[in-house]
Image (cartoon, rainbow, N blue to C red):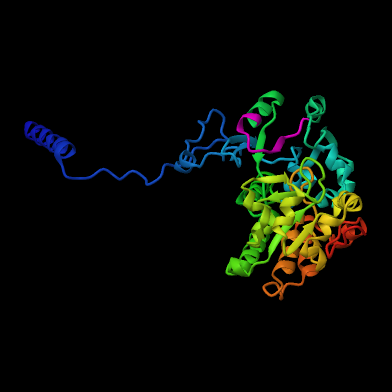
Amino acid sequence: MKKVLAMLLITALLLALCAACGGTAKAPSAPATAAPVRTDAPGSAAPAETPEAETASPEPAAESDTRIITDILGREVEIPAEVHTVAALSSATRTITYAGGLSKVVGTSEMEKRADVGMPFAYANRDYFAGCTAISSGGSGNAYYDEAIIELAPDIMIFNTNNVETCDDFQQKYGIPVVAIYADRFNSPNLTNSIRLVGEVLGTQEHAERVASAIEGWNAELNALTKDIPDSEKPSVYLGAVSFSGGHGFCGTYCNYAPLMAINALNLADALGEKGGVEIGMEQVIEWDPDIIFLNPGNMNLVNEEYAADPTAIDSLRAVQEGKVYAQVNFNYYSTNMELAIVDAYYAGTVIFPEAFKDIDFEVKAEEIFNTMIGMDYLDILEENGLGFGPVTIGG
C-alpha cells in the first residue's frame, strides 16, 4: 500500500512540473508606467529624463551685432546691427537729412556747419549742425581731418561718391565701415535710391520712403505736364549768371541743366554739345536771341557790373526788351541742393509753359517741397536774402 501511495505522489509532482514548463497560462502584464522613484529618500536614484526633456527646443541663438548691406556702388559692407553715430563725408549730410537720419550725424564739414542760406537743409538745421564735430573743410578743395575722425570714432561713415576705390581706401585707413551713396541729380534714380539706402542703414525707412516717393512724384508730374508739347511750340531759353567753380556773369551758362531737362524745355546751351557749366561769348547769346532768359539772383552783382560797363549788348536782346528775364536760384552749393533744384524746375515751368502749369500754384508747391525735404517753409528766407523767385531787373 505504501508503494502505491508513493507512486501516486511522484506522478502528481511530475504533472505539476509539466504544467509549469509547457502550459498555456500567461504571466501577468507589466504595468504601463513604472512606479515613480522617490527622490526624497536617502540613496535614491536620480529620476530618468522624460521624452519631453529629450526633444525640448534649444535656446534661441543670440542675434548678431552686425549686418551686411549693399551700398549704392554695389559694395557689401558690414555695419553694426543698429547704427547710433555717423560721420558724413563729401556732402552726405544732405541726403542723410532727406532720409530723416540727421540726429545720428556727429561729424560733418565746416561748410555745412556754417549753414548758409544757399544750403537750405543746413540752414534749417543750423542749431544741430553747430554741435557737430568738423571732420572736413568741405567745398571743392575738401580736406579731411584725420585726427577728428579717429577721435570721434563713429559707428559708420556715409560717403557721397561714385568712386569705389576711395571708399575702400577710407575704410582701410580709418578702420570704420564706409557706406557709399551717390546723389547726383534730383531727376536721377541715384538720389532716391541713396535716400532709401540711408533709411535702411539708419533705421529711418518710413521717413526715407516718404521723401523718395515724393521726389519721384514731382519728377513724374513735371514730365507729364510738358512731354507732349512739340518743340515747335516751345520758347527758346537762355540760362545765365550760373555758378560753377565760382560765380559767373551774364555769359556763364549751363548745358544739360537739370531743372530745364525735367520740364523738357529748349535750353539753347544744349546745342553746344558740352556738359555742365561753360563760359560763352556775348556774340553767341546775341545770335541765339532767346525768347526767355533766366539769371541766378546770387550773381546779379556780376551781371550788373557788366551792364554798367556796356549795356548795349544786353539791351539788344529781345527777352530783355520784353521784360522776360526771370530768376533761377543757384542750387549748386557744396554739391546739389535737391530741394532748390526741384523748386527751380517748377518755377521755370510756370514761366516757360504757363498753360501747362495753370493748375500749379508755385508758392504752394514750393513750400510743399521744402517742408517735405527740409521740414520748413523757405521762400521768405530766400526772398529776405536776395535770392527770391520772380522777374529780374538788369542794372537795377
What is the number of callouts on the image?
0
Q: Is residue 361 visible?
A: yes
Q: Is residue 80 visible?
A: no
The image shows residue 211, relative to residue 179, as above or below, that is below
- Horizontal relation, residue 1 to residue 202: left or right: left
Q: Residue at x 69, y 41 (%)?
A: 82
Front residue (pair 221, 247): 247
The question of residue 162 being in magenta is answered with yes
* Percent x, y of residue 104: 77, 43
Front residue (pair 360, 350): 350
- Quadrant position of the N terminus in the picture: top left
* Percent x, y of residue 168: 63, 29
Front residue (pair 187, 56): 187
* Percent x, y of residue 380: 89, 62
- Horizontal relation, residue 380 to residue 66: left or right: right
- Quadrant position of the C terminus in the picture: bottom right
Q: Residue at x 84, y 34 (%)?
A: 134
* Percent x, y of residue 120: 82, 52
The question of residue 226 being in magenta is answered with no
Front residue (pair 310, 217): 310
The segment highlighted magenta reads 153-166
